[in-house]
Image (cartoon, coloured by chain):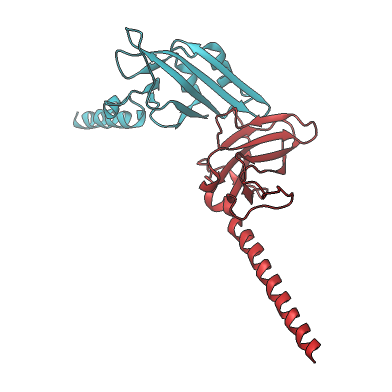
Chain colours: A red, B cyan
Amino acid sequence: MRIKVCFILLFTVFVSVSAFSQMEVTEYKAMCFEYHKHNCNYSENIYYRYNDASRSALFLKGQTSETRLEIFNGRDYRISLCADEVLGNQIYFRLINAREGNVLYDSRRDDYNMDFEFTVTQTIEIIIEVTVEGTSLPAGEHGRNGIIRRDNAMGCVGVLIEYMITPKKGF
Amino acid sequence: MYRLGLFYILVFFSNHSISGQQLNWADYENDTLVSIGTYILADEKIFIPRDTLLMNERIYCNIAELEVKSFVMTAFSIGKEFREEASGNEITVFMKNAIRNREINYKYVNFKDFKLVNLSGDIYVPEIEKIKVIITD
């Protein structure tokens, strides 16, 4: 009987803890959900359309993350970044040819510009690599791997991608 | 005769409002700014038609005693980059070729690092130090 009670108690505690953790993860996910849609600046050009490859994510200071995009010949694209103030303003992105590995654009060379527009003349797949400069606080006294301090600066970063058919010029 | 007069008045006023790009330096009396043709670079982002950029030869300053000593123009496209520093106020041939090139099709150009100089050789910088000029067709 006693064992049964202990078992039920343990089970109840276990379920509550995991439900609470799920809620925390869900809350973090919810924090950045569609962040790019509501925070990034859309183009003033009415011909640009929203691209479903746009996304948002939670970033730590000092973190780099990437996402892929196929860009098509005959289209113009606009990629713009937005981020929570807590991450600072030293955020940059690079566009890398996924097949050849060469860097096609680095926003650090463009004075950390937060948006970039271009015309595509050849269909390729690119990697959009976003980096939040800075360092996170050290993991702990012994610097154990796999531990991230809860008081590290964390914030949402949004990548808004828009596209349009390249306008024809001339007669 | 009356109708003709009315017609001329209408034409005069409609032309006056259509042009819309006349210099209005009076609004920026206390600021040190530069301009490309009639476009006063009074904001960090400005829209200028490609033809207008190509038509204009020089960059000017609103303060009579100051002239543009040098500036830098940069432009970026996917896989392509352009950077040139001009000595003087002239938009160089290389800069114009970059703007004109529809194959690369730079969507915007940056004008920055302006140095303005007076007769005594003192160096100044404009209020807006870097301007992103979005090229409209």
- Residue B17 location, x and y as percent? 32, 32
Residue located 56% across and 33% down the image:
A112
Vertically, is A142 above or below A169?
A: below
- Residue A94 location, x and y as percent? 66, 35
Residue located 53% across and 39% down the image:
A89
Q: In the displayed orientation, state which residue is furthest to the front.
A: A141
Q: How many marks?
A: 0
Vertically, is A66 above or below B110?
A: below
Residue A170 visible in rendering: no
Q: Nearer the viewer, residue B43 or A124?
A: B43
Left or right: B85 as drawn, with respect to A137: left
Residue located 27% across and 31% down the image:
B13
- Residue A31 location, x and y as percent? 58, 58
- Residue A102 appears in which quarter of the rendering? top right
Q: In the displayed orientation, state which residue is furthest to the top.
A: B120
- Residue B77 location, x and y as percent? 63, 28
Residue B87 visible in rendering: yes
Q: In the displayed orientation, state which residue is furthest to the bottom.
A: A1
Vertically, is A31 above or below A65?
A: below
Left or right: A132 as drawn, with respect to B51: right
Where is the N terminus of chain B found, in terms of image quarters? Answer: top left
Q: Nearer the viewer, residue A6 or B8?
A: A6
